[in-house]
Image: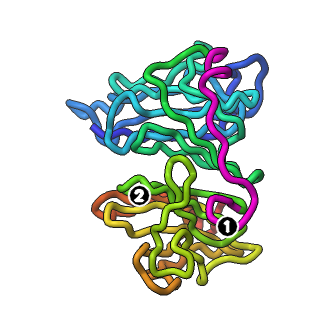
Amino acid sequence: MGYIGYGWESYDTQGCVSGAGQFDQLANIANANGPGGNAQTGYAASPCGLQGAAKLVYDPLGRPDVNFYLDTTNNLDMLRQVQLNPPKITDPRAQQSWGKFNLGPDDLLLHPSGAVITLNSATSRIESLKLPTAAVSDSEAAVNLIANLHGDLGDRPGLFNNPTVATITAEGVILIVETGNNRIHAIDASANPVPLFTKQSSKYFFPFSATGGARTQYLDSAVEFSGFIYVLSANNSVYRLDIYHPDQSGTSPISTTMGFNAAKVTVDYWRNVYSLNYEVLMINSNAML
C-alpha cells in the first residue's frame, strides 16, 4: 500500500515544547481505503505541534522504515523517523534522532545510497548525512551524527548561488535548481560535480533561457525514470511547468505548460504528474481566496 505524508501550518495548543502559538503538524494517510472501505486505515499524525517548518521525505521504494521528517523546533534540525508498518510519526519528545543538520532546510531529499540531503538557500550550502543503522539520543546525534557541509557561494562546479529546490535521478544524480545562477547543477551525494549535461557549454550545468530574472521563483522540480526534468516556476503570478532532458543540445524547454498554478509537483515512473494546486473557491460567481 502506498502512503502520502503531508505537513501544514496550524494553531495548536499543545506544542512539542512549552508554550503555544503557530505550529507545524504532520500526518500520514493511505492512498486508498483499507479493507471494507475503512478510510482510517494507515492514518497517523504527529503527537504534538512543531515549531518551524518541518520537512518530510518518503522512500520511493516503499520501504516502511526509511522515511523521515526534520524537526526544526528551537533550531534543533534533528532527523526523526516516520514508520509505515504500522504507520507512526516519532514523538519529538522521545528525543530519538537519526542525525543532526547544521542549517535550516529549504528542501529535503533521500538519496538511494542511504544519505539524506538538504539545501540552505541563504548560505548557498548543501548538507549530506549518511544514515546510521538505528536511531540514537539527541545528545549523541549532536556529537556523532552531524551532517557534512558542502559548497558555498559561487558559480564554478561544486559551488552554488541560492540553491532552491532539488530532485534525484534514477541513477542517483542530484539536480539542484539554483535561483542565483539560473541553472540546474548536477552533483553526487558528496557534492562532487557530475558531467550529466554533455551537450551544454558546461557538462555540469543546464542553464535556463526561458525563465529567470528578479521576479522568478523556482517552486519545485522533479525527474522521471528516463531522465526528463520537470521545473515548476512562477514570475509575477504567472505559473509554468517546463520539461527538459539532460541530452538536449539547446536550452529551450522541450515542453511548456502555462497557467500551471501549483505550489509543488512530482512525477512517477509513468510520467503521471501530480501537483499541489492553488484552487479558487467561487461563491455566487465571486472568487474567494
Q: Is residue 33 above or below residue 188?
A: above
Residue 183: which numbered mark, if any? Answer: none
Residue 156: which numbered mark, if any? Answer: 1
Q: Amino acid at mark 2?
A: Thr
**Outermost residue toward the left in this view:** 36
Q: Secondary structure at mark 1?
A: loop
Label 1 neighbour load within 10 Å: few <14, some 14-19, many 20+: few
* Horizontal side, residue 224 vs residue 289: left or right: left
Mark in front: 1 vs 2: 1
Query: Where is residue 132 drawn, in percent x and y?
Result: 48, 25
Query: Where is residue 268 drawn, in percent x and y?
Result: 34, 57
Location of residue 9 by image quarter: top right
The residue identified by callout 2 is: 169
N-term-proximal mark, 1 vs 2 = 1
Q: Which residues are magenta?
A: 138-160
Query: Where is residue 177 drawn, in percent x and y?
Result: 59, 63
Q: Secondary structure at mark 2?
A: loop
Residue in the image at 44% along x and 33% along y: 67
Residue 50 inside the magenta-drawn segment: no
Q: Nearer the viewer, residue 35 or 245?
A: 245
Residue in the image at 77% along x and 24% along y: 20
Alpha carbons under labels 1 and 2: distance apart: 22 Å
Residue in the image at 35% along x and 30% along y: 64
Residue 101 visible from this viewpoint: yes
Residue in the image at 58% along x and 27% along y: 99
